[in-house]
């Protein structure tokens, strides 16, 4: 199974989490939103995944829709 989405969200303890939907649901914690977003961007690029960024109140704030890497997709 490949990773389809990477999510950045505020955890209940006030830290920021980067969570993937891949096997094992890898989760990393950061003290700042900026650091979590930077890590999420890097992971999304590495895995060609959709990056979803949520705010403190769990509202969807941003979504990164990268173009497909397949040169044959119009």
Image (tube, rainbow, N blue to C red):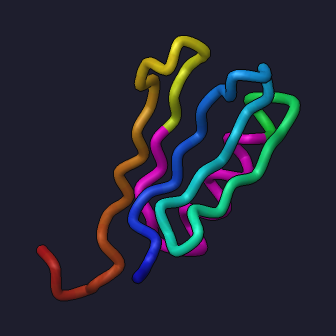
Residue drawn 80% across the image and 43% down it: 29
- Looking at the rendering, the stretch of residues picked out in magenta corresponds to 36-52
Residue drawn 39% across the image and 65% down it: 4
| Quadrant (top left/top right/bottom left/bottom right) for the C terminus | bottom left
Residue closest to the eye, 47 or 68: 47
Q: Is residue 70 left or right of residue 36?
A: left
Q: Position of residue 15 (x, y in %)?
A: 79, 28
Q: Is residue 40 magenta?
A: yes
Q: Position of residue 30 (x, y in %)?
A: 83, 39
Residue pushed farthest left?
74
Q: Position of residue 54 (x, y in %)?
A: 51, 28
Residue drawn 47% across the image and 61% down it: 21
Above or below — where is 34 with respect to 69?
Answer: above
Residue closest to the eye, 44 or 29: 29
| Quadrant (top left/top right/bottom left/bottom right) for the N terminus | bottom left
Q: Position of residue 45 (x, y in %)?
A: 56, 67
């Amino acid at each position: 199974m490949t990773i389809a989405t990477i999510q950045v969200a505020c955890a209940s303890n006030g830290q920021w989490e980067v969570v993937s939907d891949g096997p094992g649901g890898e989760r990393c914690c950061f003290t700042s939103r900026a650091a979590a977003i930077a890590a999420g961007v890097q992971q999304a690029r590495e895995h060609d995944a959709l990056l979803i960024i949520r705010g403190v109140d769990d509202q969807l704030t941003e979504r990164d829709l990268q173009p497909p890497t397949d040169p044959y997709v119009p």
